[in-house]
Image (spheres, grey):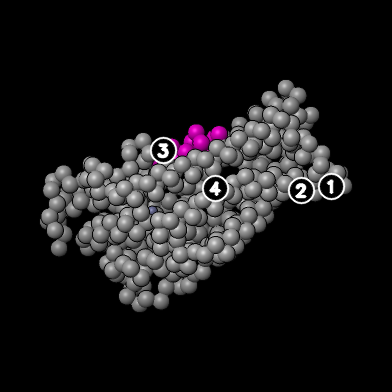
């Protein structure tokens, strides 16, 4: 194969109208979903319905604070799910329309139900702890809550591959001897060891392919979708493995947790400030009035929205680093390039999204940039390789 010196495709011609359309609708769905959640929180606060819901929860909860808080949270989540459901359903239909889904309605609906219940349990734990701290230590709750949350976050990161993911997907240890041998060689080259590689049964839900490095400590593992394992050549899978190993070697999960710690600290500081302002302006009687929960959620949404471009830029930086690690670890970059092209077609991804879209929304560099980086690397390193 030959590549022109400047072969990075700069035109949009290489993305099918179908891929463009699918991604455009997908983005609008995300924006609408965020907008509905945001509007819901605003309405609760501006109309005073949050106070009415709190009173109702207190009556139903026999004036028990913790129980009433849970009832309040449950009502909020049920209403929010009801409001967002049409969009969720539209998202499910969208995948079918573009022939990406392999899931039937029943299975999808069951996933939604499980997702809601998992969300309820996690949110329940978080919110109960949060208001417990606000009540116990009204002065310093936000610092203490931050410390506790980081602890929870680390525990969740460790448990996720063994407790959370299996609720939705099946995993089994990778049996393929050839791939295992390749991974051992890659790991030895890296001077590290990943505990395991798992086959991730994604084909029950979608035709899309994916791979990831997950877990912490003894749950650290690489997961490879069966949609990838069954359709890609061993060299291509090795390139994907090398990329995931790059994340491991560069300690990206640990660094992301550090980053998360900074963001969460800022979030709690802002939440405390916002709650104090609200109490000073008599929106709420006291800090521990859980009718102010929508205000906390709103603060969190605004902060994550404002920081999203920066966090995505950081994520793309990590992805470039993992790609570079892959280039160095595999014999030639060709399998990397072909795996990228396969991935783009299979996932109906846009190879060349607009500059702004990529900067704001993309956690990975666009496929065209990743391929271009591989080509540049090859040009610079040709001759130095056997
Ligand atoms: Zn990656």
Asked if 37 appears above or below 176 in the picture, the reply is above
Asked if 42 appears above or below 209 in the picture, the reply is above
Q: Are the residues tagged 1 and 4 within 8 Å (C-beta)?
A: no
Q: Are the residues tagged 2 and 1 within 8 Å (C-beta)?
A: yes
Circle nearer the N terminus (4, 2): 2
Stretch in magenta: 302-314
Decide if residue 17 is on the left or right side of residue 381. Answer: right
For the residues labelled 3 and 4, the Cα–Cα distance comes to 22 Å
For the residues labelled 3 and 2, the Cα–Cα distance comes to 36 Å
For the residues labelled 4 and 2, the Cα–Cα distance comes to 25 Å
Residue 348 in view (yes/no):
yes
Q: Nearer the viewer, mark 3 or mark 1?
A: 1
Decide if residue 69 is on the left or right side of residue 218. Answer: right
Circle nearer the N terminus (2, 1): 1
Decide if residue 32 is on the left or right side of residue 296. Answer: left
Query: Which residue is identified by label 2?
Result: 71
Looking at the figure, which quarter contains the C terminus? Answer: bottom left
For the residues labelled 2 and 1, the Cα–Cα distance comes to 8 Å
Query: Which residue is identified by label 1?
Result: 60
Q: Nearer the viewer, mark 1 or mark 4?
A: 4
Residue 13 point in image, percent of width and height: 24, 45
Circle nearer the N terminus (3, 4): 4
Q: Are the residues tagged 4 and 2 within 8 Å (C-beta)?
A: no
Decide if residue 47 is on the left or right side of residue 263. Answer: right
Query: Which residue is identified by label 3?
Result: 360
For the residues labelled 1 and 4, the Cα–Cα distance comes to 31 Å
The extreme right residue here reads 62
Q: Quarter of the image holding residue 69?
A: top right
Q: Which element is circle 1 on?
A: helix
Query: Which residue is identified by label 4?
Result: 87
Q: Quarter of the image holding residue 130?
A: top right
């Amino acid at each position: 194969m030959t590549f022109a010196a400047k072969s990075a495709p700069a035109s949009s011609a290489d993305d099918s109208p179908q891929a463009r359309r699918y991604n455009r609708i997908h983005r609008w769905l995300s924006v609408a979903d965020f907008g509905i959640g945001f509007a819901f929180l605003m309405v609760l606060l501006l109309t005073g319905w949050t106070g009415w819901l709190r009173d109702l929860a207190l009556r139903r909860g026999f004036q028990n604070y913790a129980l009433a808080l849970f009832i309040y949270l449950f009502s909020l989540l049920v209403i929010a799910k009801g409001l967002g459901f049409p969009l969720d359903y539209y998202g499910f239909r969208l995948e079918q329309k573009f022939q990406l889904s392999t899931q039937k309605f029943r299975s999808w609906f069951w996933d939604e139900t499980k997702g809601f219940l998992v969300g309820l349990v996690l949110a329940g734990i978080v919110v109960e702890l949060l208001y417990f701290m606000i009540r116990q230590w009204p002065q310093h709750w936000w610092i203490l809550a931050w410390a506790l949350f980081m602890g929870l976050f680390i525990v969740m990161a460790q448990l996720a591959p063994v407790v959370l993911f299996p609720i939705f997907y099946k995993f089994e240890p990778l049996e393929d001897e050839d791939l295992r041998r390749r991974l051992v060689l890659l790991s030895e080259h890296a001077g590290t060891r990943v505990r395991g590689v798992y086959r991730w049964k994604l084909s029950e839900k979608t035709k899309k392919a994916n791979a990831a490095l997950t877990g912490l400590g003894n749950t650290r593992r690489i997961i490879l979708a069966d949609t990838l394992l069954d359709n890609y050549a061993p060299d291509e899978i090795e390139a994907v493995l090398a990329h995931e190993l790059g994340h491991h070697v560069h300690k990206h999960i640990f660094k992301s947790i550090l980053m998360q710690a900074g963001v969460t600290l800022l979030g709690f500081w802002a939440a405390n400030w916002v709650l104090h302002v609200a109490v000073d302006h008599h929106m709420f009687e006291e800090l521990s009035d859980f009718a102010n929960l929508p205000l906390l959620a709103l603060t969190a949404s605004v902060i994550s929205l404002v920081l999203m471009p920066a966090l995505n830029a950081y994520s793309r930086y990590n992805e470039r680093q993992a790609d570079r690690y892959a280039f160095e670890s595999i014999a030639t970059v060709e399998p990397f390039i072909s795996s990228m092209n396969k991935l783009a077609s299979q996932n109906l991804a846009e190879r060349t999204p607009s500059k702004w879209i990529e900067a704001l929304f993309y956690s990975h560099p666009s496929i065209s940039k990743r391929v271009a980086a591989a080509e540049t690397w090859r040009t610079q390193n040709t001759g130095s390789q056997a």
